[in-house]
Image (spheres, rainbow, N blue to C red):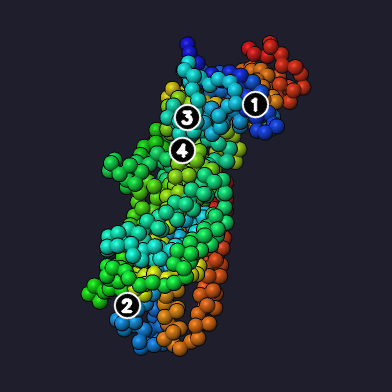
Amino acid sequence: MTASTDSLPAPRTPAPADRAAAFGLRVLQAGPVLILGLLCVVMALSSPYFATERNLANLGFQASFVAVLALGQLLVIITRGIDLSVGSVVGLAGVLAIGAGGSFVTVLAFAATGLAVGLANGTVLVWGRVMNPFIVTLGMLGIVRGLALVISDGQTETGLPPVIGTLGSGTVAGIPVPVLLVSGLAIAIGLLLGRTQWGRWIYAVGGNPDAARRAGIPADHVLLSVYALCGLMAGIAAILVAGRTDSGAPQAGQLLELDAITAVIIGGASFLGGRGRVTNVIAGALIIGVIRNGLDLLDVSPFWQLIAVGSLVIVSLELDVMRGRLETRLRASQTRAAAT
Amino acid sequence: MTPLLEVRGAVKSYGAVTALDGADLTVAQGEVVALLGDNGAGKSTLIKAISGVHTLDAGELRVEGAAVTFASPREAQDAGIDTLHQDLGLFDNLSAVANFRIGRELRRPRFLGRLAFLRERAMEDDWRTQLERLAVHRVDPRQEVGLMSGGQRQAIAVLRAVAFADRLVILDEPTAALGLREAGQVLDLVRRLPEQGVAVLLISHNLQHVAEVADRAVVLRQGRTVGEAAPTSANHEALVSMIVGAVPPPAAAST
């Protein structure tokens, strides 16, 4: 057809300023991993103990709870949501798993508790017409923690099958089992998000919920699935916490939800939804771990850890704003190029 | 010949507001029909009913003679009807090809269903084929749509609407955000669709664009169909009068 010679806009060769902006964006995307690397170098130089196998294993144990929770939280945050109830799930799952029975049943009890709370969150959110995940999961935070305290009568109990101890504090060839577990989960979530149709839809629902519905995407089921998976991750984190302490404590996991959210934000996911990568979120969890561990080694008061991590959250948000600016600039220059 | 699409007595209210009050519309096979009307005349509501975003309170929707109700946009798509909504409905966080294929991703293996893996390479290849079929210039399939210019974004949204529909494409203000040349390119694309057996329902405030591509113009006013005319420049004033309601709809206006 003759009309085809002059057709819809084609991409232009980028100007140098655009290239700089595009490069800046790429650096920001790798930001969390770069920050983690930098932190590790600084810590290794400051303390000879930091890079020892024993300390790194210890760091791995500590960071694993947050990492697992953060993987679940990432899914939810991509869809513009948040799940404040995951810390409470860690408490309730531990309490319910005590005395559940054999290895298999106990592991199942942990997972089922998490999944059940996640499904409850998702159901209320989607079909209860309470379209505010902050409020729904804030309510659930209280309910679930309260249940844990009521059921246990506030008592910490022991008596978990050995498999929980192995999962929470065992090592294989010097590598902590939780680290292996987190790696496996990270790969699974990474594949889900990056390679599957459902993962594409999770990003779509986060990017533009209305358009997702109009494109025929079952947005309600997508939302339900991310809260369910987030709950399941909390159940798995509960195994690690219980295995580490060899007990089921109703207060376990308090404030862990905030660590998980912090890890996701440091990992560069956007609260506006639609953005976030597994690698960066794992880096976020490790950054928190390294800061705590490193400051411990340097004998800095734990009070300062709070300030350090808090500052990093704000810096991360600032980086997100910067990313937005760079994108706007790129878009503007593309429009200009198209107009000429 | 049975019309491709027939809407009769369409009624839709939002609370106390009656958006559609018995509107009628017919689109023949391979026809380009313009839907005209002032703001609030009910154009968007009508196309939302046809595209399955809303269901009608009353009235009838027929596709090739058979009565249908579209409970979701997916059902309309399955019937061969695709829509470009005014807000484009793009995902800024996804690539061009991901936007193009959203909800229609190629995947494998089949037995994994919606958990199946995306066939990115195949989707990119298909994207290039589609661009060729629709005679559209290359757009980088991997670039995020949020980083693209307004014209490119509009192009992707238009492409998505026209590439998969095999019966009817509904375009709500497809040239709104475009410059002169880009608008011309979209209009070219619209003109080519009937050659492929696809009908077009076009909403536009730009009567000149309508005159360039449409076979027929139907005017809505206060939720009702008030008349129709061939959108020639001779009928320009008659159409404008119908749109603003300056004169009672003359039956003679349809030529």
Quadrant location, the N terminus of chain A: top left
Q: x%, y% of residue A88?
A: 47, 64
Q: Secondary structure at mark 2?
A: helix
The chain to which mark 1 is attached is B
Q: CA distance from mark 3 to mark 1?
A: 20 Å
SS at circle 3: helix
Q: Chain of mark 4?
A: A
Q: CA distance from mark 2 to mark 3?
A: 56 Å
> Which three-letter amino acid code belongs to the residue tagged 4?
Gly
Q: Which residue is mark 2?
A: A57
Quick one: label 3 or label 1, which is nearer the N terminus? 1
Measured as percent of width and height from the top left, residue A287 is found at 43, 73
Do the residues under discs 2 and 4 have CB atoms within 8 angstroms?
Answer: no
Contact (Cβ within 8 Å) of mark 2 with mark 3: no
> Residue A216, which numbered label?
4
Give the residue number, with chain letter if any, for mark 3: B76
Residue sitting at x 30%, y 44%: B112
Determine if marks 2 and 4 fall on one subunit. Answer: yes
Q: Residues within 10 Å of mark 2 (few under 14, many from 20)?
A: some
Q: What residue appears at the point 45 percent right and 78 percent down from the top-left corner? A: A291
Tell me which numbered mark, 2 or 4, is placed earlier along the sequence: 2
Residue type marked 1: Leu
Going by the picture, which residue comes out furthest to the front? A153
Give the quadrant of residue A107.
bottom left
Identify the residue under disc 1.
Answer: B20
Q: Are marks 3 and 1 in contact (CB under 8 Å)?
A: no
Residues A6 and A73: in front is A73
The secondary structure type at the circle numbered 4 is loop
Residue flagged by tag 2: what amino acid is it? Ala
**Label 3 chain ID:** B
The reply to the same-chain question for discs 4 and 1 is no
